[in-house]
Amino acid sequence: MSVATTAPEAAPRHPEPGPSLLNRLIVRPEIGAALGALVVFLFFSIITDKFLSPLGVATWLDDASTLGIMAVAVAMLMIGGEFDLSAGVMTASTALVTALLAVHAGWNVWLALLVSLLFALAVGALNGWVVMRTGLPSFIVTLGTFLALQGLNLGVTRLVTGTVQVSGIRSADGYSSAGWVFASTTNIGDARIQASVVWWIVLTAIAGLVLVRTKFGNWVFAVGGSLISARAVGVPAVRTKILLFMTTAFAGWVVGSCNILRFASVQANQGVGLEFQYIIAAVVGGCLLTGGFGSVVGAAIGALIFGMARQGIVFARWDSDWFMLFLGVLLLSAVLVNNAFKKRAERVRR
């Protein structure tokens, strides 16, 4: 007679608890910028009544918008491990190309905008190609581009107009429709929201989706984290970095187009020095200077902090010179906070 035996029942498995809400927030690169923006918003809301007025909100959103457009593109490039010091002067170069062709050559504004876009993309592609072909630091390559564009802006503008300024685009053919796209205003209650704010929001959303939801976004993080490892697993590193430089140039074209069609004039030295503000906004938003880590949403929030602080200082009737002190403290604090968050995020992911 045989004795039937039954295997002991397996102990029920309980799913491992997921990461806590705090840990999920810590791994987000933009969390530091979000907290900083909240502090700045509350501070100026308390000390000045104008800050939260419809005019006040429209003013600091307008201030942040063009900076935010560039900061988003610069953030993607920094996540990819590179810098672009020609980003600021590119806004002037594209605006000058548009204005010279529309005003002095008599072209339709839309055709002039197309040529200036092709010019920007060509410069961006050249920057990326030279960096990848030569192995030189992008800091040096784009510094050379910055100087070349600055000289070209001044030389060509003075040669054509006899001055360092181009104006009169409002009389050009096609200005009305182009102005509606790049320089119109939308009334929301008593606030007048500029078209650049809409561009800022739309481009941030698109860049955010591309970075976290597409294969190209994975490539960006890969080439920024380790170029050698990225190439070893088949990431098209050259194509990825060239496209990132072209993205920064495209953002410069958008900002330049918004500026020339809104103000109807452009100075040859416009945009010089702003490239550092774009980098600072990206760093405040969570990007590391070493690449491979960051957030375009954080960069947009970093630009918002700039706008709120710059206009908040004006509304509070403080000396605007204090803004540079604010920038210095903000940059140092952001670098320290970002490094701390990155280390904490690495521990949470293990």
Image (cartoon, rainbow, N blue to C red):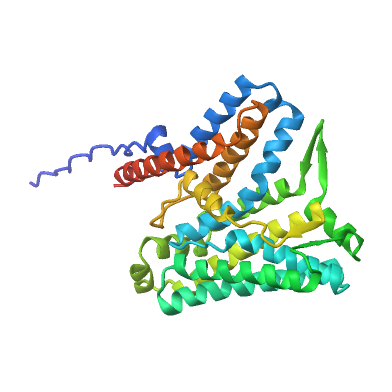
Q: Nearer the viewer, residue 270 or 300?
A: 270
Residue 6 location in percent, x, y?
A: 17, 42
213 vs 101: above or below: above
Farthest bottom residue?
133
* Res. 194 visible in picture: yes
Residue 299, position in %: x, y?
54, 47
The image shows residue 303, relative to residue 271, as above or below, that is: above
Would you identify the image quadrant in which residue 94 lies? bottom right
Q: Residue at x 57, y 37 (%)?
A: 321
Residue sitting at x 32%, y 47%: 346
Q: Residue at x 61, y 37 (%)?
A: 310
Measured along the vertical axis of the image, is residue 145 above or below residue 202?
A: below
Q: Is residue 276 above or below residue 174?
A: above
Q: Which residue occupies the extreme front position in the image?
A: 162
| Viewer-nearest residue: 314 or 82 | 314
Which of the pair 277/150 is nearer the observer?
Answer: 150
Residue located at (76% from left, 31% from top):
55
In the picture, residue 264 is in which quadrant? bottom right
* Residue 137 spot, x, y in % from top left: 42, 68
Which of the pair 316/258 is nearer the observer?
316
Report the residue that reaches farthest toward the left: 1
| Residue 15 horizontal side relative to residue 213, left or right | left
In the rendering, at what x and y percent does residue 273 appear?
57, 54
From where the camera sits, is residue 111 visible?
A: no
Q: How many marks?
A: 0
244 displayed left or right of 228: right
Relative placement, left or right, of 302 versus 29 is: right
